[in-house]
Amino acid sequence: KMKHGTVIAINKCDQIKRVEKKKGGCEMKKIIANLEEYICAGLLLMIVISTLLQVLSRYLIGSPIGWTEELARFLMIWLVFFGASAGIKRQEHIKVEFFLQKMPEKLRKVVIAGSMAITAIFLIILIYQGALLTIQMSSVPAVTMPITIAYIYLAIPIGCLFILLRLIQYRTL
């Protein structure tokens, strides 16, 4: 123990550091570091529940609930964008490295930096255009749900913002 309620501890967030007696520092870092995975897990769970509700209502009641299919589709759209962000973070997107491996180290770094810059510019354009599209769709109602289509189109700017932030954070494609 040290002065003022501080202890020296070894934890998963940092090797050795001073830790205040109150909790929350390490847990918050874990949540932020894995935010996409938590969101994807929640979205996938809601898709499964919605689809299960659709199947059960169709075969048990004989009358399917109309909004469950639309909800599952909308959730899948959001899942795709957050899954793409998680893929950037984990470096799990498909890439062809054959030519990169044949290049000299300096040229390889230039090509990787160039592809990251092009990807970042593309994401910024998608964020901007997605925001414009979301605003345009703010008065268009969904077919079976009492929401506007803007909530679905909002996945474009928010999802691309997450992808861009992870691209900057991990500097990798």
Image (tube, rainbow, N blue to C red):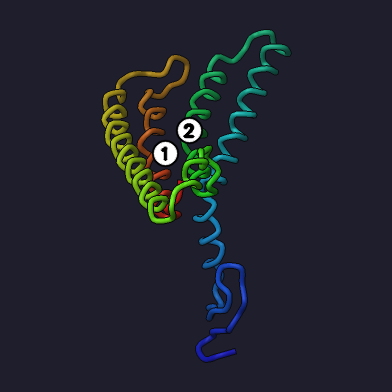
Q: Label 2 belongs to which residue? A: 78
Q: Mark 2 belongs to which amino acid? A: Trp
Q: Secondary structure at mark 2?
A: helix
Q: Secondary structure at mark 1?
A: helix
Residue 83 visible within the image:
no
Q: Which mark is residue 144?
A: none
Q: Position of residue 162 (x, y in %)?
A: 42, 45
Residue 5 visible within the image:
yes
- Label 2 and label 1: CA atoms lie apart by 7 Å
Task: Look at the picture and state if 75 lies above or below 165.
Answer: above
Residue at the far bottom in the pictured view: 3
Residue in the picture at 31% in, 29% down: 134
Q: Which is nearer the eye, 165 or 137?
A: 165
Residue in the picture at 38% in, 33% down: 156
* Tag 2–tag 1 contact (CB < 8 Å): yes
Q: Position of residue 33 (x, y in %)?
A: 51, 55
Residue in the picture at 48% in, 33% down: 78
In what quadrant of the picture does the N terminus appear? Answer: bottom right
Q: Which mark is residue 159?
A: 1
Residue at the far top in the pictured view: 62
Task: Look at the picture and state if 37 lies above or below 33.
Answer: above
